Image (cartoon, rainbow, N blue to C red):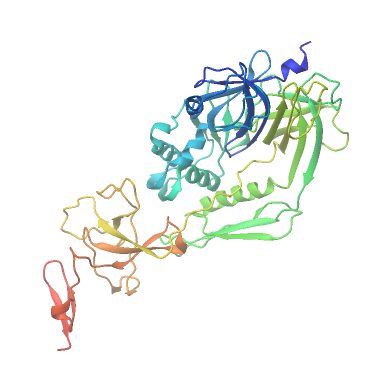
């Protein structure tokens, strides 16, 4: 039988560094729909200190943590921070490394882009492509394993936010989660929308419950407990769609928990048909229901990661109903090597030699759908901003308006800023008076500067407030005719009201 001290030993390999490193201790945290982070304290095996060039070479280099003599259960990522620890003795050259996924780099690309007539998966793919040299590639670096059917969104704005924040809130809105697959030679980002997307850990499809901490070399669940929370009873959504203004878009209440307390009513969740509203209400109910019951366990299973499924077997406490299948929602990993005590104290199975590994996991019963919490704030556009009227043919002398009186514009914040009617959806203008075929309306021509406001500050809900003259397209009333009021067409037909 392999010595547990050997099984639990952690190795680290950084492709940007020739000097071998020895792991002193490690602590890592991973959660569904969040980037993982491992903090690893290491020292050089040859006692030769790393120089600045070595630290520079480590930044961004592919780095892998692994366990045991055969380098099992790899954790792939990149080093994004290195700290030289205080020197406390002769020959001591210790460092603290922060290992994160390549997804972390999407925090460093920030800006504003507009997405037209795209489904959620297409929006996420397009946003990831904005990261230049750091862009994740479909297939090799990420995949979307979605089973649901999603309608295209007419107009979605990424406004002054990082790619990471944008794809996070898009995924949260549609109930899409992600986790990381380390089976290959890199950290692979995997999106899913049902619990069927969560894989099983090969060889640990079933994990036994065994309380013999320190006396069993098997990788098992050593402790397990349950948290029960009070949640809401039901949720309903309401929305307004100006395309079908007479249709009341209010969903029936979706049950969260029959024993819950209180009802949730949400307005403005961006659904445009009753069927889409029902789907969105179900997603919101599933997200809230998933917090009602969670299990917390301590295990010695080295390969267990957030996003794995497994069935708990063995001597689970009778009568508690804990022997069932679970999804790992989060995992905190801790380990230390000989001669170095863990910063968090000895864990289950700790030996006098200090060789130990354990993880603390939060579990969701697999029959409950996992949905990511809505935690990423949506940016708001306060006040007004300017834009320019656009058209499919910029030299068009006609008013570039559709059959419903709407216009397309070029927004000032759009990084792409594509002309030719490809920079916005059709946007309604506000007029002094209006109704069913009557009212007061004057058209806007191509290149006219207009003022835009956004309903409730939502970047996805623009309205044209009116035109604003500029030095290239001045007002019809200036110094020389200050006593007049003028209504003029582009071709010189005018109505003049004079006080002189």
Above or below, 119 relative to 298: below
Task: Name the residue furthest top.
Answer: 1
Q: Quadrant of the C terminus?
A: bottom left
Q: Quadrant of residue 10?
A: top right
Q: Position of residue 315 (x, y in %)?
A: 86, 27
Q: Position of residue 37 (x, y in %)?
A: 60, 35
Q: Position of residue 324 (x, y in %)?
A: 77, 32
Q: Quadrant of residue 447?
A: bottom left
Above or below, 309 relative to 258: above
Above or below, 204 relative to 157: above
Mark count: 0
Q: Position of 55 compared to 416: left or right? A: right
Please say whether residue 253 is visible from this viewpoint.
no
Task: Name the residue furthest front.
Answer: 90
Q: Position of residue 479 (x, y in %)?
A: 16, 78
Please say whether residue 55 is visible from this viewpoint.
yes
Q: Quadrant of the N terminus?
A: top right
- Who is closer to the viewer here, 82 or 358? 82
Task: Name the residue furthest left.
Answer: 492
Task: Name the residue furthest right.
Answer: 318
- Who is closer to the viewer here, 252 or 4? 4
Q: Quadrant of residue 2?
A: top right
Above or below, 190 relative to 205: below
């Amino acid at each position: 039988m392999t010595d547990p001290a050997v099984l639990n030993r952690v190795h680290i390999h950084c492709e940007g560094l020739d000097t071998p490193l020895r792991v002193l201790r490690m602590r890592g945290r991973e959660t569904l729909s969040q980037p993982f982070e491992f903090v690893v304290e290491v020292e050089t095996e040859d006692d030769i200190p790393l120089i600045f060039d070595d630290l520079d070479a480590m930044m961004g280099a592919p780095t892998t943590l692994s366990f045991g003599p055969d380098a099992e259960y790899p954790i792939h990522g990149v080093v994004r921070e290195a700290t030289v620890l205080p020197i406390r003795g002769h020959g001591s050259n210790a460092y603290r490394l922060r290992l994160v996924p390549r997804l972390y780099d999407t925090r460093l690309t920030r800006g504003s882009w507009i997405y037209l007539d795209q489904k959620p998966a297409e929006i996420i793919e397009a946003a990831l492509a904005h990261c230049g040299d750091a862009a994740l590639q479909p297939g090799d670096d990420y995949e979307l394993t979605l089973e649901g059917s999603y309608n295209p969104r007419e107009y979605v704005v990424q406004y002054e936010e990082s790619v990471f924040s944008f794809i996070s809130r898009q995924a949260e809105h549609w109930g899409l989660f992600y986790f990381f697959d380390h089976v290959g030679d890199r950290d692979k980002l995997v999106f899913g929308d049902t619990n069927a997307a969560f894989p099983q850990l090969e060889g640990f499809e079933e994990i036994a419950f065994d309380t013999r901490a320190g006396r069993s070399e098997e990788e098992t669940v050593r402790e397990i407990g349950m948290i029960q929370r009070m949640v809401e009873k039901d949720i309903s959504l309401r929305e307004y769609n100006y395309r079908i203004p007479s249709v009341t878009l209010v969903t029936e209440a979706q049950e969260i928990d029959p024993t819950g307390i209180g009802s949730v009513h949400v307005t403005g969740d961006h659904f445009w048909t009753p069927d889409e509203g029902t789907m969105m209400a179900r997603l919101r109910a599933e997200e809230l229901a998933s917090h009602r019951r969670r299990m917390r366990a301590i295990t010695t299973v080295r390969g267990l990661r957030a996003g794995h499924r497994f069935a708990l077997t063995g001597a689970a406490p009778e009568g508690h109903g804990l022997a069932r299948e679970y999804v790992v929602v989060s995992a905190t990993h801790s380990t230390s090597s000989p001669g170095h005590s863990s910063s968090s104290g000895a864990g289950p199975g700790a030996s006098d030699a200090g060789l130990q590994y354990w993880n603390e996991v939060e579990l969701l019963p697999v029959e409950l759908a996992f949905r990511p919490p809505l935690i990423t704030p949506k940016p708001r556009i306060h006040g007004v901003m300017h834009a320019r009227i656009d058209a499919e043919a910029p030299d068009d002398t006609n008013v570039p308006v559709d059959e419903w009186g709407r216009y397309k514009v070029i927004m000032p914040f759009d990084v792409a800023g594509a002309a030719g009617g490809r920079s916005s959806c059709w946007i309604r203008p506000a007029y002094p008076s209006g109704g069913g075929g009557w009212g007061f309306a004057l058209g806007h021509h191509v290149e006219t500067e207009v003022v835009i406001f956004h309903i409730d500050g939502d970047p996805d809900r623009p309205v044209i407030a009116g035109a604003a003259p500029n030095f290239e397209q001045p007002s019809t009333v200036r110094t020389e005719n200050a006593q007049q009021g003028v209504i003029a067409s582009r071709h010189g037909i005018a109505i003049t009201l004079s006080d002189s």
